[in-house]
Image: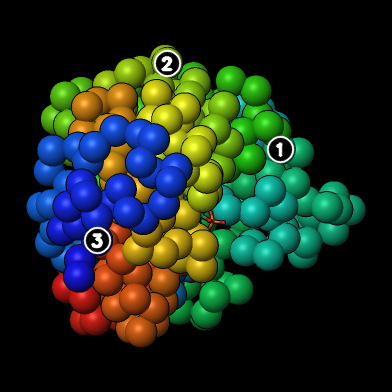
């Protein structure tokens, strides 16, 4: 049975905690294939979080891309996953005396010199760590949609406000984008809450698996609960979807990071709303969506 097809009665039987909370929100039974998000771009096929990975997602036909946003020493927002530049660039070669090569310790000009593609393969030599501005331009060019992660916000005071400022400057807070092309997520509940408070119209996601008992508090400020696929079950997905988020719609679940067909089928069977994947084409071939 598809989780989103579960009735209110069935959900009530899933656990005592779930029965304490609201009946399923309207629309919870509208199951279709999950939306598929290209994680860090199509990062199974191109270097993660680069413009090439955005291009690859577009080439494969994917509308949604995920990225990770951090901040340089001189205050530029850049798209990179680790808090160190060492794994995905040639920073150690260019700046051998700057260990541990933290993003926050390098200027935007220094980061712009780095090769963020060669580690992945010679075809991508010269790919750069994009600024958030460059990144959203490329996403816009492809008419794609953005699942933006604020990464390690504890390292970057007020990064939420700054991220929203950049998005606003680039037109991403206009109704055309906020209504269906943008979600801002974080592992930090405080960060997600801050985004919601600063710009209530923006759709938000919390990365993690809060207990069902905690969900009413999360539903005040987040539209999505986005867990590792390893931590979800049919019962949990149904329990999450039984709540309404801050915009009055059923809370959604996007599971990550699913790169094989069997796991894709498993989590799709749980009724997740989205699957985040480095190999989105593999997920699409297994469960549809896109
Ligand atoms: O979007 C989900 C996923 O990106 C969270 O984990 O470490 O890949 O940013 P991570
Ligand atoms: Ca991420």
Which residue appears farthest toward the top when viewing the image? 198
Along the horizontal axis of the image, is 101 left or right of 162? Answer: right
Q: Does residue 52 sit above or below 150 in this rendering?
A: below
Q: Which quarter of the picture shows residue 157? A: top right
The answer to whether any part of residue 51 appears in the image is: no
The tag on residue 104 is: 1
Q: For the residues marked 3 and 2, what is the alpha-carbon distance in whole angstroms?
A: 31 Å
What label sits on residue 197 in the rendered view? Answer: 2
Q: Residue at x 27, y 21 (%)?
A: 201
Determine the secondary structure under disc 2: helix
Q: Give me the C-alpha separation between circle 3 and circle 1.
A: 42 Å
Mark 2: is the Cβ under 8 angstroms from ligand 1? no
Q: At x 52% / y 45%, what residue is drawn?
A: 211
Which class describes the residues within 10 Å of circle 1: few (<14), some (14-19), or many (20+)?
some
Q: Mark 3 points at which residue?
A: 3
283 and 102: which one is in front? 283
- Label drawn at residue 223: none
Q: Which of 235 and 282 is in front in this view?
A: 235
User: x%, y% of residue 40?
Assistant: 44, 58
Q: Position of residue 165 (x, y in %)?
A: 41, 20
Q: Position of residue 64 (x, y in %)?
A: 27, 54
Nearest to N terminus: mark 3 or mark 1: 3
Q: Upstream in the sequence, badge 3 or badge 2?
A: 3
- Quarter of the rendering occupied by the N terminus: bottom left
């Amino acid at each position: 049975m598809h989780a989103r097809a579960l009735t209110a009665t069935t959900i009530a039987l899933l656990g005592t905690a779930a029965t304490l909370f609201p009946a399923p929100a309207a629309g919870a039974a509208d199951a279709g294939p999950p939306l598929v998000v290209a994680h860090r771009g199509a990062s199974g096929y191109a270097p993660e979080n680069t413009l090439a990975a955005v291009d690859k997602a577009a080439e494969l036909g994917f509308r949604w891309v995920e990225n990770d946003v951090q901040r340089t020493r001189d205050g530029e927002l850049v798209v990179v996953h680790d808090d160190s530049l060492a794994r995905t660039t040639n920073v150690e070669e260019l700046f051998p005396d700057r260990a541990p090569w933290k993003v926050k310790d390098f200027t935007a000009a220094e980061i712009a010199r780095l090769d963020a593609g060669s580690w992945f393969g010679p075809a991508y030599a010269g790919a750069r760590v994009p600024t958030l501005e460059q990144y959203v331009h490329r996403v816009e060019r492809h008419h794609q949609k953005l699942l933006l992660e604020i990464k390690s916000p504890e390292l970057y005071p007020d990064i939420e406000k700054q991220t929203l400022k950049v998005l606003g400057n680039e037109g991403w807070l206009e109704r055309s984008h906020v209504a269906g092309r943008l979600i801002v997520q974080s592992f930090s509940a405080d960060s997600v809450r801050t985004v919601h408070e600063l710009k209530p119209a923006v759709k938000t996601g919390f990365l993690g698996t809060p207990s069902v008992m905690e969900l009413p508090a999360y539903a005040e400020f987040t539209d999505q609960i986005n867990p590792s696929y390893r931590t979800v079950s049919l019962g949990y997905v149904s329990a999450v979807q039984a709540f309404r988020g801050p915009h009055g719609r059923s809370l959604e679940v996007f599971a990550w990071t699913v790169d094989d067909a069997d796991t894709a089928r498993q989590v799709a069977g749980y009724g997740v709303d989205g699957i985040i994947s480095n190999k989105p084409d593999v997920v699409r071939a297994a469960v549809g969506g896109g």
